[in-house]
Every structure is written in C-alpha cells, then in structure tokens.
Amino acid sequence: MPSRIFLVNVGVNASHRVKSPLFPDGTFELLPIPEERRWWAPTLPAYPKLERFNTPGESLALYVPERYRNVRVHHDPEFETFTYGDNPNTSPRAAGLKAAGPGDCLFFLARLVPWLDGRFHDEPGFYLVGYLEIEEVLKDVIRFPSGREFQVFGANAHVRRAAYHPKALDGFWVWKGSPSSRRLRYAVPLTRELCDATLRDANGEPWRWDAGRSDLQVIGSYTRAARLVIDPSTPDGREQAERWWRAVAERNGAVRTSR
C-alpha cells in the first residue's frame, strides 16, 4: 500500500525578502529561510555557502539581495543526508507531525517565483519540491546527539544550531529519510485541480475556493500547518495517493510510490 503523506510548507515565503526561483524549464532552486538572529552561529551557513542544485559549484547568492547575503540560514529540509527538523511540542503548526513515523512520507511544498533574464518576474505559485520517505525519527531532543545519532541526524539545521547554542536543545524532533527520499528536479505545481482530486481539510471535507481569494491564498491557508493529508487506508485514500504520485512522476519520471 502507498505510504501515508504528510504535507509540510518549507523555504522562504511571502514574509521574507528572499525568493526561490522557478526556471522556464520547470527546474528550481529552494532557498531556506533566514535563521532567527538569536540563533546565528558559525555552524550555520549563509546563502553564499549553499550550492545551487542545478549548477553545482555555484552558490545561491545570485538570487539573494545584497543585504541578505551574509544572513545565516536555517537549511531545513536538507537533501544531502535527507533530514527535516521541527518542534511539534512547541509549534502548533508542526503538532501534526508527531504522527509521522517510519514508512510515511513528508512531502515538501514551497513558494516559487518565476526567474527569467536575471530577475524575478510574474506571480508566485506553490509547488511540490521533494519528499522524505521516513526511515527513523529522533524525538524530544534535549541532549546533544552523539555517536550513531549524530552520524544519522547531525547535518540537520536544528542539530547544527544546538552545537553552538545549548538552549536550542528544546525538545525538537528530526525525521530521517530513507535512500528512496528525493529532492525533485522539476517542481510539481500544486494546482487547484490536483488539490480537489487529492486533498481534504482537517474535517475530511473538500477545500473551499472562496471567490474573494486567489488560489495562492487558499492553498497557503490550507497548508500553513503541517499535517497528514493523504491516508491510503481510508476509503478514498488509495486513489488520492495514486493520483498524487502520478502528478509527481509526470514531471520527474519514476518515483517510489509504495513501501
């Protein structure tokens, strides 16, 4: 049976001065959010230290305003060792992730803005950018990971933050992805059609597309909190999961769709 799917909104958004570029061929770069100033540390990279996915060896600084290029960032999720961290104990928006365990998939949704001729232009949209097939979870971290735990989870931004700021050991969680996890090469638009075919609200009802709000606003409001969005064990869940994975595969080729 296909994995349960949790949806998590990541990367810079409308509240930031930094944007993630979407290129004409459908490829993209995912820019992480700036780290909170109180957590800045040498263990955390600034934008120029992060390599572009599409042109290895070149940095993400090209897409960042000059005044933000030395800002330390919260590079999470990271697709080098496939980890994602959050704190479902203290963040209401992450509380739903407590239910995410081995075999489930964390799908990442990001706000991307078209980039052409060296600048951002046109309207942003929400796109699926990658996923972790969960292999292991590090829960309630109040002591710095050591030994095997550090080897498995040490690349995550929460762990890197805590290496310099012990107060950051506040009970956060980190999810580790299996080798089947993937940073997508081509962004998958989360369209109104795909939402209607696959997603329901927290009460199991279809989304409401209010006439006075744009599709971007509706999608943003429904995806603000990370939560389980597709459960293949429910009456319609298997069909929804298969439709979801087909949408990903249509742009990215074969993907792992079941355990």
Image (cartoon, rainbow, N blue to C red):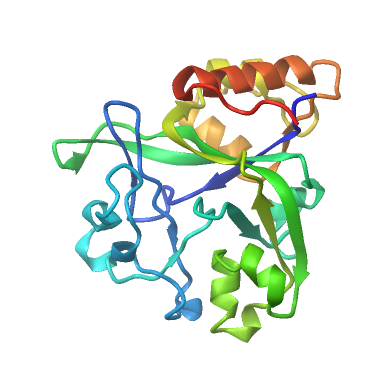
Q: Position of residue 162 (x, y in %)?
A: 59, 78
Q: Which quadrant: the N terminus?
A: top right
> Which residue occupies the foreground of this view, 14 or 214?
14
Residue at 73 percent across and 14 percent down: it is 239
Residue at 66 percent across and 20 percent down: it is 198
Q: Position of residue 146 (x, y in %)?
A: 69, 77
Residue at 33 percent across and 62 percent down: it is 47
Q: Position of residue 72 (x, y in %)?
A: 39, 70
> Which residue occupies the foreground of this view, 95 or 70?
70
The image shows a total of numbered marks equal to 0
Residue at 27 percent across and 66 percent down: it is 69
Left or right of 136, for residue 181: left
Write down the quadrant of residue 92 in the picture.
bottom right
Write down the quadrant of residue 132 in the picture.
top right
Residue 47 to residue 136: above or below: below
Residue 97 to residue 139: above or below: above
Q: Which quadrant: the C terminus?
A: top right
Q: Can residue 109 be seen in this view?
A: yes
Left or right of 173, for residue 11: left
Q: Is residue 108 visible?
A: no
Write down the quadrant of residue 27 in the picture.
top left
Left or right of 128, for residue 20: left
Q: Position of residue 139 (x, y in %)?
A: 77, 64
Residue 68 to residue 76: above or below: below
Residue furthest left as drawn: 117
